[in-house]
Amino acid sequence: MLSALDLARRIEAGELTPRAVVALCAQAIAAREKEIGAFAALDLDAARRAAEEPRLASMPLRGLPVAFKDIFDTADFPTQYGSPIYTGYRPRADATAVALTRRAGGNIIGKTVTTEFASLVPSSTRNPRNAAHTPGGSSSGSAAAVAAAMVPIAFGTQTAGSVIRPAAFCGVTGFKPSYRLIPMVGVKDVAWHLDTAGLFGAGVADVAFAAAAILDRDLRVDGASPSAPRIALVRTHLWGQASAAMQNAVESAARIAHAAGARVSDVSLPALLEDAYAAQFIIQDYETFRACAFEYDRHRDRIGKQLREQLDRAAAISADAYDAARRSSSRARKALADTMAEHDVILTPSAPGAAPRGLGGTGDPMFNRLWTLMGAPCINLPGFYEGDLPLGIQIVGRFGRDRAALEAALFVERAIMHKLGN
């Protein structure tokens, strides 16, 4: 993988140029894109021309190549939302996150494959770690592109688990910030109370660097050694559905963090959080049916069978049920804040296990839904394996305390790397 922070430092020092980094990406794309299929649109010639801009090397992102999931509107690329309904569609304006990335000196080289309207319907992208396994969804192309060193930074979105799960399956770092920390203007809605933009990179310091540069916020964590965090080991009511290897990875991470100086405590979540987990399904489906109102009403026959049937079922959800689910989620956020009063972050699985074999599904976001609903910052940390496939562990922070969550994740990441030698 390409470390965004390392590349930026080398550009700043004059050891590397933005054009040379584009060449590195182009080399990886030439070697692996045919097998993996990470990109929905790509323009390396335009990226090479953009890299010649003299100011890029002095801008916050140093001219690093960036890719965007194909539900972000882009003026320079088609935006097709993973759907034949939008074949060849060209927006007139960039999504705000795209515009901010350009403003920070990012060189946008292409659009990555998404599932149909960012749903659970599989895409054609393959997992770079093992092409016979799913890369996850719906930000499959972004996670795969970073894992295959095609780009140092890529954007995705998460409505249930679409940043953390593909990051886990592809063995990269995924950062889902607090709800709406990254603007969602100009991004195709899936469920507006859940949709959250996030970043993929090689490591915690890389996604923190990129987020800081794009958002102009104090999010970088590479300046000093992070202090030992207070970690709540949370298995959740779904623990029994995690594979033995995943359970062992989470518990091993807890032991490693404790040995490195972290204070680790076993914590059980209140029942309100279990209720909220069930409410997430209702909120997502109710809002998705409405977010896709135009497509469903005007082009229903061009929506894939699996998503069409999901929307058919969602049509039956009443406003009363939706409102009750929203109230449940509000109560749960308060309960979670109380539960975390004595802890900095939660340690929990990123997924039930390693990436499932086959391309007929994207895996289950069961270990992500609750945290997305809570709006909490989440970071996937690679480092463990089940056979030759990566396993991800998840760090969950407090809402609005993204830098603290990133610092804690960096502490755990370094402890794991020191112990396991990854």
Image (cartoon, rainbow, N blue to C red):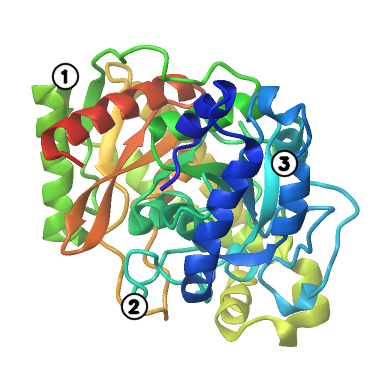
Q: Quadrant of the C terminus?
A: top left
Q: CA distance from mark 1 to mark 3?
A: 46 Å
Toward the viewer: 277 or 83?
83
Residue linked to disc 2: 132
Comparing marks 1 and 3, which lies closer to the viewer? 3
> Label 2 is placed on what type of residue?
Ala
Is 381 on the left-hand or right-hand side of 66? left
Is 298 on the left-hand or right-hand side of 413? right
Q: Is residue 24 above or below residue 271?
A: below
Residue linked to disc 3: 51
Residue lying at 86% horizontally and 63% vertically, measured from the top left: 90
For label 2, the crowd category at 10 Å Cα-Cα, with few meaning under 14, some 14 to 19 and many 20 or more, is: some
Comparing marks 3 and 2, which lies closer to the viewer? 3
Callout 3 touching callout 2 (CB < 8 Å): no
> Label 3 is placed on what type of residue?
Ala
Q: Quadrant of residue 185?
A: top right
> Label 1 is placed on what type of residue?
Arg
Q: Is residue 337 above or below residue 159?
A: above
Q: SS at mark 3?
A: loop
As drawn, the label of residue 263 is: 1
